[in-house]
Image (cartoon, rainbow, N blue to C red):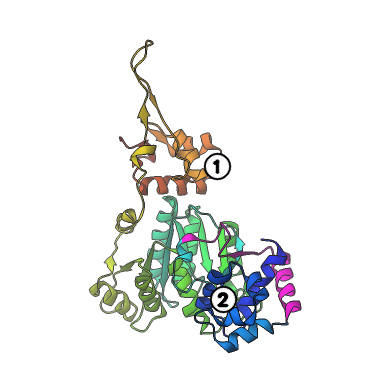
Amino acid sequence: MKDRDLKYWIALRWVEGVGHVGFKALLSAFGSPRQVFDAPLSMIKAVPGIGAKAAHQIKDFSVWEKVEKEIDCARRAGVHIVTLQDPLYPPRLACIYDNPAYLYVKGSLRDDDINIAFVGSRTASAHGLFTTERLCRELALRGATIVSGMARGIDSAAHRGALAGRGRTIAVLGCGLDIVYPPENEKLFNDIAANGAVISEFPFGAPPNAPNFPARNRIISGLSLGVVVVEAGEKSGSLITARIALEQGREVFAVPGSIDVSGSRGTNKLIKQGAKLIENIDDILEEILPQTVRMPASVKPHASQDGADGPRAKRETVPDRQFTEHEKAVWQVISQKPVHVDQIITSTGRTAAEVLGSLLSLELKGVIEQKPGKIYVRKES
């Protein structure tokens, strides 16, 4: 988005009295933030949820120099500001009730990311950290993208596990992207940005204040197909994330723990309330599967008519809309003859992370399956 349009997004979000829901109402009514600022006061007042005070604040907005400085800070930091109308804005996040109008993004977002969130205690046990790293490493090796909050404990272990599996990971911060919090995670911050994305809804300079973290948690769950809770006390913020995930219609998983450990009380309680107990990544993936859409019959392989040259030969079609570009490239390599993952990577010329993500996505869509030894085949139609 061009800076001259982007400044209206930032300005409208900064107007006092215009929250996430009010912003969406204005966007729906006028089509763009710029048209909101150009609209007559009477029309702005008429938008449901926008009172007279907020309407006057919009018309009286004057700190445009501060907005321009924010855009300049993003440019110099290599940060993209992705708005709701940007194709890169995460589609699942766009569907939640109070989604942010825009995100600050350092790194890259992909429309084919299969996001699974991990949250848990900042003071996790050695067992909790080991379990988190193992699960996230294995999920990353299958092509999933791990989402967490880069906090101490379980969050950091989740990101480390994803990176160890050479996969993608996304960190959602409760502060501006010019602040690394906690400070000891500076290297982790840079590694995540290079192998996924670090994102925030908060402007540059925003400190990691306590009220920011519940807001951050709705983004963590909103981005994801499911949320895995590891080691949470009875009043843990991770339980808030689990509750938000349920409200957003996301799957909730919990790693069981010893009844003698206080850090297990929250997760064990979640299991009693209906969260799925997980022992391995298959417990997660089998619940994610129903959320994906199988490729319609109209785009499955079909056969040509018999001809004079012999029996009819099968021709494979590549769907234009049901597959992403990454998935199409992988789909073209896989046939009914088993293909090893290394050959797929070599044939497509794409990175291992891109290929693994596409393979998992195609598995979840029900059009390919993995055989022992990292061998992949198309499923029979």
**At which x and y percent is residue 38?**
68, 74
Q: Foreground residue, 158 or 334?
A: 334
The residues tagged by marks 1 and 2 sit, at their Cα atoms, a distance apart of: 34 Å
Q: Amino acid at mark 2?
A: Pro
User: What secondary structure is found at the residue carrying circle 1?
Assistant: loop
Left-right relation of 344 to 283: right
Which residue does the numbered mark 1 point to in the structure image?
350
The image quadrant where one finds the C terminus is top left
Look at 72% across and 66% down and name the residue there. Answer: 4
Left-right relation of 235 to 276: right
Question: Can the viewer see residue 158 in this picture?
Answer: no
Which residue does the numbered mark 2 point to in the structure image?
182
Q: Please state the extent of the stretch shown in magenta in the rendering.
A: 63-91
Look at 49% across and 71% down and name the residue there. Answer: 99
Residue 231 sits in quarter: bottom left
Q: Amino acid at mark 1?
A: Arg
**At which x and y percent is residue 43?**
59, 78
Q: Nearer the viewer, mark 1 or mark 2?
A: 1
